[in-house]
Image (spheres, rainbow, N blue to C red):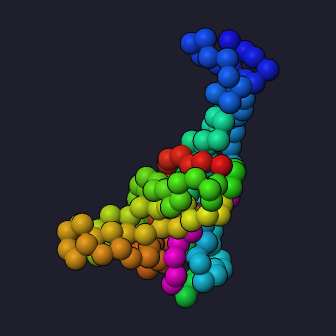
Amino acid sequence: RVTAGGITFNGDSAAANGIDDYEEGTFTPTMSYHAGSSSIAYSLQQGQYTKIGNTVFFHLRINLSNKGSSSGNHVIFEGLPYTPSTSTISNSMMKFDAVQGVVMNDDGTMPFCQVQGTAKFYLYTFDYGGAGDYAEFTISNLTNTSQMSVSGHYYV
């Protein structure tokens, strides 16, 4: 039922439990490097989201036509529709799919990304097949035609 506090279910009438915010939309994701970047060019930039209460569910896709240049530090995705909360679960993990043109040192290394307190996702790798070490996902992990997809949710 719809109340002044939002939509409630199963007879719950507490305003604190009502869903009072729902939104669907698109956004334009971008990519950068932590140490600064130049000349990044895209052949595709797509982002979709659904916000329900304080949770944003999203999917983004970035296809590069030029990875640009940087001194090699972290790859970052930006342009999220809402700034992630710093008072809820921090550093939440996101599913990262390397669709094409992503370079890994061995088949046990898997990329992932995580929210780091701002409207940005930082990319990392984890070596499941070797030393078990985390590393920054950098410009050297990309080709000029890399295609990447990220999906997940975060709290605002």
Quadrant containing the N terminus is top right
Residue 49 visible in the shown view: no
Q: Quadrant of residue 6?
A: top right
Image: 110 above or below 134? above
Residue segment shown in magenta: 72-79
Q: Residue at x 61, y 72 (%)?
A: 32
Q: Quadrant of residue 34?
A: bottom right
Give the side of residue 23 with respect to residue 123, left or right.
right
Expressed as whole percent of the image width and height from the top left, the position of residue 61 reads 54, 52
Outermost residue toward the left in this view? 129
Residue 77 within the segment the image draws in magenta: yes
Q: Residue at x 43, y 69 (%)?
A: 124
Q: Nearer the viewer, residue 130 or 75?
A: 130
Q: Nearer the viewer, residue 155 or 46?
A: 155
Expressed as whole percent of the image width and height from the top left, the position of residue 23 reads 70, 34
Expressed as whole percent of the image width and height from the top left, the position of residue 135 reads 39, 76
Give the side of residue 104 with respect to residue 10, left or right.
left
